[in-house]
């Protein structure tokens, strides 16, 4: 296995990933931007509802990629390429079986999902193979990240994002509506998955077995934390789709999309903070300094964007999504506050994962359950839901600081 970027500086490698991830995120935003404008509120609400499922499944992908990356990097440092090969092949085989089972379960309950979300069953059936790809592609990308082949990883992210954007525009233009937008997501992952293999050339070594217990322990805690925090900023979309009209749900979906820009800023800071603290887990003083800086930087970025949302809400909504969505402009600043505290909570969660904490999972679980209860009980208006989210996430952030 060749490490094409092994001798390059960390700064240069980091710049490669930074640019690639920026292009990927821009492509994702443009995908939703044009989908919302071309489809209209009612039809776009179908896409947004299914993306809530995609985001939740994506937490499994993130867990897998983080786990594979961590142990691939460890084996690479120890010059145990056989273990990397074993991890890749064994992991691919096991996770493929699990993904088939989960896809079958998903297909069985798809009529219930369609009924709850009040959407046609066809787009749900279209997205079902996504589960298989969501389990397999993070293995390949995790190995690429672990062996520090950042060029291949970055190009793969760009390929996925651009394929999804271009194909979605084409299919929506041809009249396939929400089905076309969802199909583009599936095809982009298939293309990206196929193009990881040229950079993963190594022989299978059956004798280089590894102890799976440590891997399972880390992946379980990581998955629980990432799944719960993702659920907090996606379950509201499900419930709004259930309790409100299709047009109102589409408006809320756009509101949530704009709010997530703040959260994605926090994830970038988290990508830098997590490995730094993990590498010096036992050095508490250094960890505290890194954590404090991360909280400060996250606060500056997120509050700045939220302030822009407050000051220029009508202009932002009008330019980005058109007059059809102008009704949400009055809630954009408040939703930004919700995302500020969610972003800070996310940094706290990554910090606790890095230093090996586990009990904080209870805090997130309680916050999620309270969110569901509050929305079910108090959903007279969309503003009422946003207010509940702000209060809950302020409390979650405070609890995670302890």
Image (cartoon, grey):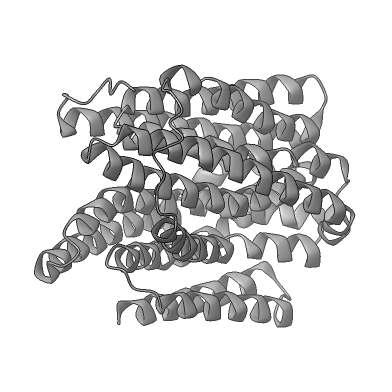
Q: Is 283 in front, or is 186?
A: 283
Q: Is 223 in front, or is 365?
A: 223
Quadrant location of the N terminus in the rendered image = top left
Q: Please tell me in which quadrant of the rendered image residue 132 appears.
A: top right
Outermost residue on the top side: it is 198
Residue 255 position, x and y percent, is 59, 54
Q: Is residue 349 visible?
A: yes
Residue 352 position, x and y percent, is 32, 69
Residue 353 position, x and y percent, is 35, 65
Q: Is 238 in front, or is 259?
A: 238
Q: Residue at x 24, y 29 (%)?
A: 13
- Establish if 48 lies above or below 392: above
Q: Please tell me in which quadrant of the rendered image residue 320 appears.
A: top right
Quadrant location of the C terminus in the rendered image = bottom left
**Residue 36 shown left or right of residue 399 in the figure:** right
- Establish if 105 lies above or below 171: below
- Establish if 333 lies above or below 51: below
Q: Please tell me in which quadrant of the rendered image residue 371 appears.
A: bottom right
**Residue 294 shown left or right of residue 311 in the figure:** left
Q: Is residue 319 visible?
A: no
Residue 15 position, x and y percent, is 25, 30
Q: Residue at x 82, y 57 (%)?
A: 113
């Amino acid at each position: 296995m060749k490490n094409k970027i092994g001798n390059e500086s960390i700064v240069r490698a980091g710049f490669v990933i930074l640019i690639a991830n920026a292009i990927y995120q821009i492509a994702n935003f443009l995908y939703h931007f044009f989908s919302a404008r071309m489809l209209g509120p009612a039809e776009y609400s179908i896409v947004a509802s299914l993306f809530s499922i995609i985001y939740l499944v994506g937490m499994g992908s993130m867990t897998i990629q983080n786990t594979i990356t961590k142990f691939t990097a460890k084996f690479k440092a120890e010059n145990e390429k056989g273990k990397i090969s074993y991890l890749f092949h064994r992991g691919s085989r096991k996770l493929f079986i699990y993904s088939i089972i989960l896809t079958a379960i998903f297909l069985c309950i798809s009529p219930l999902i369609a009924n709850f979300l009040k959407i046609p069953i066809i787009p749900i059936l279209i997205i079902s193979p996504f589960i298989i790809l969501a389990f397999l592609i993070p293995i390949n990308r995790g190995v690429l990240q672990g062996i520090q082949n950042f060029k291949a990883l970055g190009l793969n992210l760009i390929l996925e994002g651009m394929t999804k954007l271009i194909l979605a525009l084409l299919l929506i233009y041809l009249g396939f509506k929400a089905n076309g937008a969802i199909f583009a997501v599936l095809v982009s992952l298939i293309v990206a998955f196929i193009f990881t293999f040229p950079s993963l050339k190594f022989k299978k070594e059956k004798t280089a077995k590894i102890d799976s217990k440590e891997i399972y322990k880390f992946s379980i805690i990581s998955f629980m934390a990432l799944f719960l925090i993702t659920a907090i900023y996606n379950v509201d979309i499900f419930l709004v789709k259930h309790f409100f009209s299709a047009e109102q749900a589409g408006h809320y979906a756009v509101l949530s999309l704009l709010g997530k820009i703040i959260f994605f800023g926090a994830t970038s800071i988290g990508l830098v903070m997590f490995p730094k603290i993990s590498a010096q887990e036992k050095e508490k003083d250094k960890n505290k300094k890194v954590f404090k800086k991360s909280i400060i930087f996250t606060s500056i970025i997120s509050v700045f964007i939220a302030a822009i949302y407050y000051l220029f809400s009508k202009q932002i909504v009008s330019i980005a999504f058109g007059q059809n969505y102008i009704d949400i402009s009055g809630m954009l600043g408040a939703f930004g506050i919700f995302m500020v505290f969610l972003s800070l909570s996310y940094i706290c969660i990554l910090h606790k994962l890095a230093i090996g904490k586990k009990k904080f999972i209870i805090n997130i679980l309680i916050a999620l359950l309270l969110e569901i209860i509050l929305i079910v009980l108090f959903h007279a208006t969309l503003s009422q839901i946003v207010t509940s989210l702000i209060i809950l996430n302020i409390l979650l952030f405070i609890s995670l600081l302890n």
